[in-house]
Image (cartoon, coloured by chain):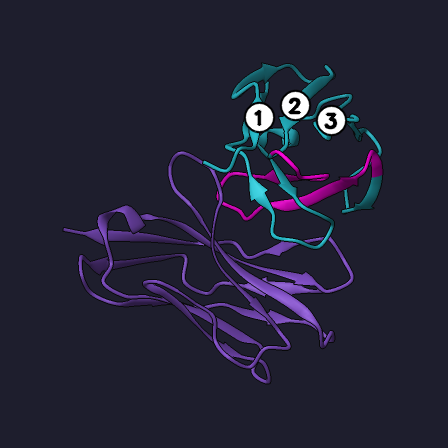
Chain colours: A purple, B cyan
Amino acid sequence: AQTVTQSQPEMSVQEAETVTLSCTYDTSESNYYLFWYKQPPSRQMILVIRQEAYKQQNATENRFSVNFQKAAKSFSLKISDSQLGDTAMYFCAFMKNNNNDMRFGAGTRLTVKP
Amino acid sequence: ETGVTQSPTHLIKTRGQQVTLRCSSQSGHNTVSWYQQALGQGPQFIFQYYREEENGRGNFPPRFSGLQFPNYSSELNVNALELDDSALYLCASSLSQKNIQYFGAGTRLSVL
């Protein structure tokens, strides 16, 4: 079974600084997708970034980038130049290539302080 | 905004009752997935519908059932409600079974 672990229940960062959220996963699959979703108090899950396991290059989306270490089964999210609007729960998620069952971690609550 | 809408936003039921939650998918999306998110936890996959057929199911009992309509909107039905069914229920639509999922804002269900 696939499991996703986020070991940091809460984190905080000063505005404009950089923060890294950790995620590890367990799978025997070789082809899969990894995601980071953001859930602000409005409850709507918003896709931050997606990584395809067969791509060695780390995905980036503006201020958001990942460090994907396939052998170590690690998928961390780096947020640069943190903004107050980045305050939210962040969920790491895993989906097998031939499956539709997306598995989520327990989440990390990020607070950006002014 | 993702274009995925869920109704109602909040709902209060008593144990043993039945509930129906609704989801309108983003325009052009033919796949809808449902998730249960208990307080303080990540979402858990309930099931997915693709072109009106169930296309995968998580570890939920049969009293959780669903439908998808020709316009690709979807319903989640829960019978014989239990206290542990209290949660945020999220719907997500995608262009096909394996594409990026776009979430609605959820329905908060409280079972008393």
Q: Which residues are magenta?
A: B27-53
Q: CA distance from mark 2 to mark 3?
A: 13 Å
Q: Is A40 displayed left or right of A30 in the figure?
A: left
**Label 2 or label 3, whichever comes before in sequence order:** 2
Instruction: Provide the chain ID for the residue under circle 3.
Output: B
In depth, the one of A104 and B73 nearer the eye is: B73
Which mark is in front, 3 or 1?
A: 3
Q: Give the secondary structure at mark 1.
A: strand
On the image, numbered disc 3 is attached to which residue?
B71
The amino acid type of the residue labelled 3 equals Asn
Q: The disc numbered 1 marks a residue on which chain? A: B
The front one of A6 and B48 is B48
Q: Chain of mark 2?
A: B
Q: Is residue B32 magenta?
A: yes
Residue at position x 32%, y 63% from top?
A63
Residue A50 image label? none
Task: Provide the secondary structure element on which disc 2 rests.
Answer: strand
Q: Amino acid at mark 2?
A: Arg
- Tell me the SS state at disc 3: loop
Question: Which one is closest to the eye, mark 2 or mark 3?
Answer: 3
Have a look at marks 1 and 2 and say if they share a chain. yes
Q: CA distance from mark 3 to mark 1?
A: 15 Å
Q: Are marks 2 and 3 on the same chain?
A: yes
From the viewer's perspective, is residue A110 above or below residue A26?
above
Q: Are marks 2 and 3 in contact (CB under 8 Å)?
A: no
Q: How far, Cα to Cα, is label 1 from label 2?
A: 6 Å
> Counting residues from the N terminus, which is met first, the one under dot 1 or under dot 2?
1
On residue B6, the disc is 1
Q: Position of residue B90 (x, y in %)?
A: 59, 36
Q: Quadrant of residue A11?
A: bottom left
Q: Which mark is residue B22?
A: 2
